[in-house]
Image (spheres, rainbow, N blue to C red):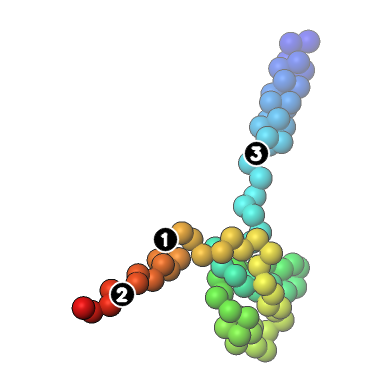
Amino acid sequence: MRSPVLALSAALLALSTVATAPASAQKYDSTSPVCKTNYRWGGEDTDCGYISLEQCRAVASGLPAMCFNNPYYAGPSIDRQRAPARRKRAPY
């Protein structure tokens, strides 16, 4: 009687461990404004490493792929934004 209970307990523990595994990463990278989806037999993958649609289209040319604006693009990071221009003093 004890053996089936232990086996069932072990199976439930293993199942709960798999069920609580972390989710996969987000499909879209929020640091690039343009993404490309590559279509292939058995699935697709998305690559968000492009700074313009033109750049992406040049890479995707002739391939079963599609370029689009990244819906999760967060904009440039604060350290990459331009500092406000300083006013020059008029010479006296």
* Quadrant that contains the N terminus: top right
Query: Which badge, 2 or 3, is on the more N-terminal residue?
Result: 3
Residue tagged by mark 2? 88
Sort mark 2 into few (<14), some (14-19) or many (20+) by Cα contacts within 10 Å: few
Distance in Å between CA atoms under marks 2 and 3: 58 Å
User: Residue extending furthest front?
Assistant: 92
User: Mark 3 belongs to which amino acid?
Assistant: Ala
Residue tagged by mark 3? 21
Residue 34 lies in what quarter of the image?
Answer: bottom right
Query: Which badge, 3 or 1, is on the more N-terminal residue?
Result: 3
Residue tagged by mark 1? 79
The reply to whether residue 28 is visible in this rendering is: yes
Sort mark 1 into few (<14), some (14-19) or many (20+) by Cα contacts within 10 Å: few
Q: Is residue 9 left or right of residue 55?
A: right
Q: Position of residue 24 (x, y in %)?
A: 64, 50
Residue contact at pointers 2 and 3, CB within 8 angstroms: no
The numbered disc on residue 71 is none
* Quadrant that contains the C terminus: bottom left
Residue 67 lies in what quarter of the image?
Answer: bottom right
Going 56% across and 67% down the picture, which residue do you hit?
Answer: 32
Going 61% across and 63% down the picture, which residue do you hit?
Answer: 73
Q: Is residue 72 left or right of residue 90?
A: right
